[in-house]
């Protein structure tokens, strides 16, 4: 199989890998070793069109199709020697720009590989220029490697927030009207249609919850939206909620009957997260802060109380600062008592089962964060990402209890998301040249 792969990639199509890419990790010049580098994810390279046609024809031929041409002949010659799963594995390792000409039948396989090669996506706002943008931060070096403007979908971009990400799609919102889905890899975005359900008379609404998720049962992407109705000019009083559910497949909203009785929601930045089929945010119900979770497949809400005795003290009557985030594939929370904010003392918990208060497990306590910092997220290696009042981005390693990296951003209102490339396309999406 190795020789067939090498012949396919470097032997017969005038595209020797050694002329395009050198594996800096292995420092190998002999082409016979390059397969090991590729399968170890040491290097990646753009596949030329001839190879793509051969691989595509190979998959097509093994599924019973018939094609004419030299690429089909090449595919037929190796169809009994190179299994289809190997072809899919090869294709899944390629960047999105090399696969856009393919019918994305292996989107799941591609993302399963791509999600292990995440980078950090930082949203920032330049208030003087009234502009919002995102910066890509390398997971390895924690350096900024690229900057992109956010597609225009609102009159005033300074109110844009990242409301989550799912399978390579970023969900953004301006809190008052617009919601945007953005696939950066495919250079495609979609502005969701306006929610058709009207506000009650003499009141105005704000989008308090807007979260993207994936329904694995139906292979559909959905956006849950909760609006709060307000009355009064100065001392605004909440007068109820409205829940709507958007389906990307049908490109439409529908009302959702939920009997939701929450009094207040927190859903911006680190107050919300999508994980394992559920969208999670913070809500206040009967004056108690709870975890509010929406099941994207079964379309039901679940509430989960937070643990007692945080930081090992009896603090039931005092207020906590609560930050939701995904920690190694599980829903996690950073809990900080406001008395300790100046000292940066946090407990880090993960949730085992929704709905059960005793299902929280404390991982560790961080005793000495830098003062006046706000957590933004947790990295794959356990590093904690923070931002301070001067818009400095900090990476903090809790085991060594020290700062790893500091980055200064010109913009403010920093928000962080983990990003991985995806082939997901939008119905009626718009091309956006970065």
Image (cartoon, helix red, strand yellow):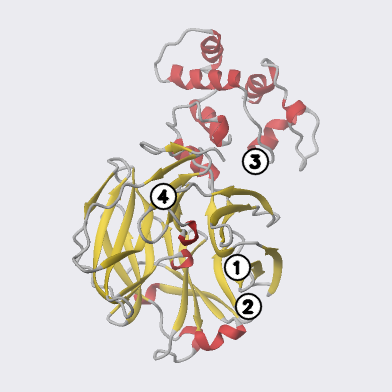
Give the residue displayed 68% in from the left and 64% down from the top. 408
Of label 1 and label 2, which has the lower sequence position?
A: 2
Give me the C-alpha separation between circle 1 and circle 4.
Answer: 28 Å
Q: CA distance from mark 2 to mark 3?
A: 35 Å
Measured Cα–Cα span from mark 2 to mark 4: 34 Å
Residues tagged 4 and 3 counted as in contact (Cβ below 8 A): no
Please give the name of the residue rendered at 50% of the width and 21% of the height, measured from the top-left corner. Answer: 56
Number of the front mark, 2 or 4: 4
How many marks on residues?
4
Q: Which residue is mark 2?
A: 369
Q: Given contact means CB atoms under 8 Å apart, are the residues at marks 2 and 3 in contact?
A: no
Assign a secondary structure to mark 3.
loop
Q: CA distance from mark 3 to mark 1?
A: 26 Å
Question: Are the residues flagged by discs 1 and 2 in contact, CB closer than 8 Å?
Answer: yes
Inspect this view and state whether residue 81 appears. Answer: no
Residue topped by disc 4: 180
Return the residue at label 3.
41
For the residues labelled 4 and 3, the Cα–Cα distance comes to 32 Å
> Against 97, is 195 above or below?
below
Mark positioned earlier in the residue sequence (1 or 4): 4
């Amino acid at each position: 199989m190795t020789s067939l792969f090498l012949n396919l990639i470097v032997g017969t199509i005038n595209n020797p890998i050694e002329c395009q890419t050198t594996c800096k990790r292995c420092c190998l010049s002999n082409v016979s070793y390059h397969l090991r580098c590729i399968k170890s994810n040491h290097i990646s390279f753009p596949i030329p069109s001839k190879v793509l046609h051969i691989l595509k024809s190979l998959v097509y031929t093994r599924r019973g199709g018939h094609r004419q041409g030299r690429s089909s002949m090449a595919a037929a010659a190796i169809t009994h020697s190179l299994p289809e799963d190997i072809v899919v594995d090869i294709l899944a390792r390629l960047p999105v720009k090399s696969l856009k000409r393919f019918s994305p039948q292996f989107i799941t396989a591609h993302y399963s590989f791509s999600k292990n090669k995440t980078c950090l996506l930082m949203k920032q706002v330049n208030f003087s220029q009234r502009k919002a943008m995102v910066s890509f931060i390398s997971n390895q070096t924690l350096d900024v490697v690229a900057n992109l403007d956010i597609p225009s979908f609102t009159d005033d971009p300074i109110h844009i927030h990242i409301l989550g990400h799912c399978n390579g799609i970023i969900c953004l919102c301006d809190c008052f009207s617009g919601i945007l889905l953005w696939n950066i890899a495919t250079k495609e975005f979609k502005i969701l249609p306006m929610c058709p359900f009207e506000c009650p008379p003499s009141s105005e609404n704000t989008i308090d919850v807007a979260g993207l998720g994936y329904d694995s049962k139906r292979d559909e992407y959905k956006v849950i939206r909760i609006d709060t109705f307000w009355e009064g000019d100065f001392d605004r009083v909440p007068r109820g909620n409205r829940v709507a559910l958007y389906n990307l497949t049908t490109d439409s909203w529908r009302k959702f009957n939920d009997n939701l009785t929450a009094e207040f929601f927190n859903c911006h930045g680190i107050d919300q997260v999508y994980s394992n089929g559920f969208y999670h945010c913070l809500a206040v119900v009967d004056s108690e802060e709870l975890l509010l979770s929406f099941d994207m497949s079964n379309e039901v809400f679940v509430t989960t109380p937070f643990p007692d005795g945080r930081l090992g003290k009896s603090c039931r009557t005092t207020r906590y600062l609560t930050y939701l985030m995904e920690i190694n594939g599980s829903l996690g929370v950073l809990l900080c008592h406001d008395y300790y904010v100046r000292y940066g003392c946090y407990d880090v918990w993960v949730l085992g089962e929704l709905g059960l208060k005793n299902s929280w497990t404390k991982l560790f306590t961080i005793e000495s964060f830098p003062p006046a910092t706000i957590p933004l997220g947790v990295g794959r290696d356990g590093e904690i990402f923070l931002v301070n009042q001067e818009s400095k981005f900090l990476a903090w390693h809790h085991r060594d209890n020290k700062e790893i990296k500091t980055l200064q951003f010109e913009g403010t209102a920093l928000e962080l998301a983990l990003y991985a490339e995806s082939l997901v396309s939008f119905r009626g999406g718009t091309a956006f040249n970065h």
